[in-house]
Amino acid sequence: MATDLETLLRGPKGYLLARKAIDAMEGYRVAPTALNFELWIHYITARDTPLAAEMDGVLASGRPFTDEVGEAIAALHLPSAKLTGEILEAGETLTKELDSVSRAIESARETSELYGQQLATASESLDRQDTDAVKAMVQTLSIATRKVREENQALEIQLADTTEELDRLREHLELVRRDAMTDGLTGLANRKAFDEALERTCVQADLKDETITLALVDIDHFKTFNDTWGHQTGDQVLRYVSSVMERVTPAPRLAARYGGEEFALIFPGEPVSTVLEVLEAARVEVSSRLLKRRSTNEDLGTITISIGYAERRPGELAVGLLERADGALYASKRGGRNRTTQADPPPASKAA
């Protein structure tokens, strides 16, 4: 879809497509941000996609197409990006480019309308004019034709320049996005990326009437291990546990380093029973491996992890979900560690 869209935007009808998207956004009172422009370009060019179906549902409901709604839909169907300082600067540049193209399109449209009016006037007047008047009229039409041609050529050049700028920005944003979202030691999503992902996933869950399960994972006695073997060996342990967390959370799940020796896992739209199976498998895998110190090949023994998880309640804020998962994690630690605990389990689980 992206390749077809780029082909359309690079083609001779690219500015018409841009104008159509801008008109649609204006009709629904949608803010002309770069993200909204990308959403609406996709929406008007590909009507049989999940993105279009999602937007149809929002528009049909009569709800305002707010920035939060747009961000949730984009996160579900378009590559995501983080609004760091560099990205904000790039976004402002993109908005300026779009504004410039919009003004050029409007100018070309006005020139074309004027040219059409001149042609209509000439057609009505030709039969009533003498030779000199006809010559003068032909000269006027020649000037108008040249002006339209020059406007179109200028617009084509501007669209080509803008396309190059968009390609450059896209590459830059992707590099910044990776740096902004990634924990340098483990390669997992970092705390900032996790916080934004959890907020976004909660919005999506409300739009789709789905559940979310959040799990917090902590390496047991990690400080003691770190003090005994040193920080480099501690980093080795962190990377090992993160590799297990990453393997059990393929998209649309998400694993992040929450801080220190703590990890956070997001499971959108899955039964809590499935989540428990995944968490227990990860816990058993971590504790079953005998670790060795890379530099000396010394036996480090085994490590264990404690896990707490909570299923999101309808409409619950991210902060409330986090608090309940954190409470379940501490219940695992108080209960002896190396175990998995559910927050607010149903009565049957409590009885068991």
Image (cartoon, rainbow, N blue to C red):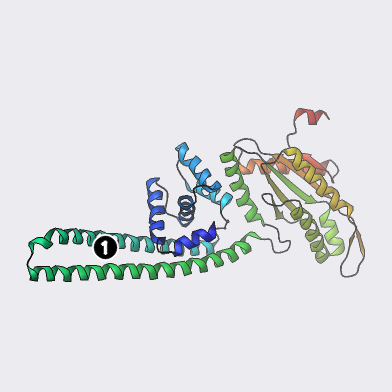
Residue found 85% across the figure and 48% down from its top: 284
The answer to whether residue 331 is visible is no
262 or 21: which is nearer to us?
21
Give how far across and how far down residue 71 sits, in percent. 53, 50
Position of residue 4 in the picture relative to residue 311 (left or right): left
253 or 193: which is nearer to us?
253
| Residue at the limit of the structure toward the right, as seen here | 299
261 or 72: which is nearer to us?
72
Give how far across and how far down residue 250 sits, in percent. 71, 52
Q: On the image, which quarter does residue 171 sit in?
A: bottom right
The image quadrant where one finds the N terminus is: bottom right
Total labels: the figure holds 1
Secondary structure of the residue carrying tag 1 is: helix
Residue found 60% across the figure and 43% down from its top: 202
> Mark 1 belongs to which amino acid?
Thr
Q: Residues within 10 Å of mark 1 (few under 14, many from 20)?
A: some
The answer to whether residue 210 is visible is yes
Is residue 314 placed above or below 166 in the rendered structure? above
Give how far across and how far down residue 294 sits, in percent. 87, 67
Q: On the image, which quarter does residue 148 sit in?
A: bottom left
Q: On the image, which quarter does residue 241 sit in?
A: bottom right
Residue found 46% across the figure and 60% down from its top: 8
The image quadrant where one finds the C terminus is: top right
258 or 210: which is nearer to us?
210
Position of residue 73 in the picture relative to residue 27 (left or right): right
> According to the image, label 1 marks what residue?
111
Give how far across and how far down residue 75 sits, in percent. 57, 51
Position of residue 25 in the picture relative to residue 317 (left or right): left
Residue found 42% across the figure and 48% down from its top: 30
